[in-house]
Amino acid sequence: MIKLLKNKKFWLPAVGVLVGGTLGFLYYFFIGCSSGSCPITGSPVGSIIFGSLIGLLLTVK
């Protein structure tokens, strides 16, 4: 368990998911779809999940 926490291959994707989720929520909060008809930006959950997935994809080799 301690080796996992010291491993860069664990932390880089974890940080990518956190940063992506945060940016997804901020996108929803400041820019998001006001009518609610947009599938990704219509709800905070969708924006957070989409942002987290993009963050994960950008950080995994």
Image (tube, rainbow, N blue to C red):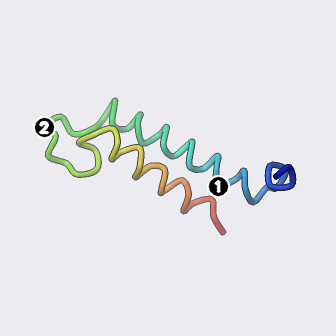
Front-lying residue, 28 or 44: 44
Tag 2's secondary structure?
A: loop
Q: Mark 1 or mark 2, which is nearer the start of the sequence?
A: 1
Write down the residue under mark 1: 13
Circle 1 Cα neighbour tier, 10 Å, few/some/many (<14 / 14–19 / ≥20)? some
Report the residue at 56% width, 42% height from top.
19
Q: Position of residue 20 (x, y in %)?
A: 51, 46
Identify the image quadrant of the C terminus.
bottom right
Left or right of 10 on screen, residue 50: left
Q: Distance between the Cα atoms at labels 2 and 1? A: 33 Å
Write down the residue under mark 2: 35
Farthest-out residue, top: 30
Amino acid on which disc 1 is placed: Pro
Is there CB contact under 8 Å for labels 2 and 1? no
Amino acid on which disc 2 is placed: Ser
Left or right of 52 on screen, residue 36: left
Report the residue at 72% width, 50% height from top.
11
Q: Position of residue 38 (x, y in %)?
A: 19, 48
Q: Position of residue 50 (x, y in %)?
A: 40, 52
Report the residue at 33% width, 47% height from top.
46
With respect to residue 27, does 3 lie above or below?
A: below
Farthest-out residue, front: 1
Q: Toward which corner of the image does residue 29 lie, by quadrant?
A: top left
Left or right of 59 on screen, residue 48: left
Name the disc covering residue 1, or none: none
With respect to residue 54, does 41 lie above or below?
A: above
Report the residue at 60% width, 50% height from top.
16
With respect to residue 5, does 34 lie above or below?
A: above
Q: Position of residue 43 (x, y in %)?
A: 27, 40
Circle 2 Cα neighbour tier, 10 Å, few/some/many (<14 / 14–19 / ≥20)? few
